[in-house]
Amino acid sequence: MTLADLELDEDQRAFQETAREFATADFSPHAAKWDEECLFPVDALRKAAALGFAGIYVGETHGGSDLSRTDAAIIFEELSSGCVSTSAYISIHNMASWMIDSFGNDDQRAKWLPQLMTMTHFASYCLTEPGAGSDAASLQTRAERDGDYYVLNGSKAFISGGSTSDIYVCMVRTGGEGAAGISCIVVEKGTPGLSFGKKETKLGWNSQPTAAVIFQDCRVPVANRIGAVGDGFKIAMKSLDGGRLNVAACSVGGARACLEAARAHMLNRKQFGRPIADFQALQFKLADMATELEAARLMVRKAAGALDAGHPEATQYCAMAKRFATDAGFQVCNDALQLHGGYGYTKEYPIERFLRDVRVHQILEGTNEIMRVIIARRLLRE
């Protein structure tokens, strides 16, 4: 039991155990195959949805679980201890679904959420463009009004679920330059003018496809706009607060799996006639790994609590937690690989896969350099 777990209530302990058992039974045994063969595990995802994990913080009206961000952090840590990549896709699906639930109207919620909550349909979040990464407000994909439709032209880059998802929640430019000119629109798979780039070959996150989403005179009903004209950037940023916590929790879960594997290896591996756990240098390494991991978990849960409470500094806490937990998570995985020696570098052991999967968490949902920008701006404002 961790320090953070001491504060969990009975319900939280129950779904923590459910998520842990599911990850152990349905993710861990297959994660290496999904990674090696770049398989999108539809059946496993739909089993996760049956447990309520497709809409963790979506309202109950259309099948969501209506849990808190703290609850989500607990669940994503457990799921990612089985497969970081697949758990991270579930996070993205939750983000997109939450945007529809929180900012859509009744008709939109009734139209899209029931199938998203069962993962009969999958969802993607589309913000990044080839020329607009960290500077997201500079995005150029345009949506020109034409009667009851918007005509979209442009492209989105590095979209998780690209070409596979059924629903694409997109930030597009309906007005002038800057954040105020951005609106949020849902584009459904099969819409004329919607196409996809090649599937990216990636270092990690191989159980989820990644591709460009391309719009060429793509006609989308005005009725698919989420929120008011010009609200898109604000909606996107609100979703990212939670998304940052989710990937931070996924880093904690992946790192925890590596820490547990490193501990077991140290107790079993013998060199110089005794277990390597007897060597103080390696004991200190393991102690530091556990300490960094516990600190990361506590930061994630504090930030999640702030987001749940509507704390005015919640965005700063989320940025801090994301920066710290994703850096610490990668380092713990790397240290675990080192403790395994040459074995850790082989695919016979899961350490290298966890290492590859958590690495991207320092880049997506806002790079860790951008997290520092957010934190510094908050600290220096007058």
Image (cartoon, rainbow, N blue to C red):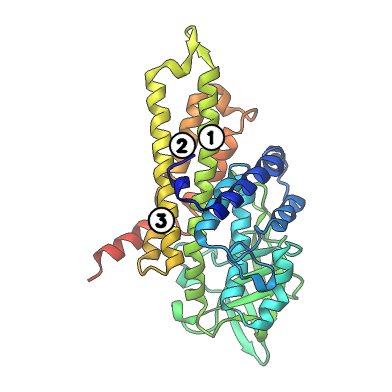
In the image, residue 170 above or below residue 241: below
Q: Is label 1 in contact with label 3 (beta carbons under 8 Å)? A: no
Mark 3 residue element: helix
For badge 3, the amino acid type reads Lys
Q: How far apart are marks 2 and 3 (CA)?
A: 21 Å
Name the residue nearer the viewer: 151 or 361: 361
Of marks 1 and 2, which one's residue comes earlier in the chain? 1
Residue 258 tag number: 1
Furthest residue toward front: 10
Furthest residue toward top: 273
For badge 1, the amino acid type reads Cys
Judging by the rendered image, the residue that carries numbered circle 3 is 302
For badge 2, the amino acid type reads Val
In the image, residue 245 above or below residue 182: above
Judging by the rendered image, the residue that carries numbered circle 2 is 332
Q: Which of marks 2 and 3 is in front?
A: 3
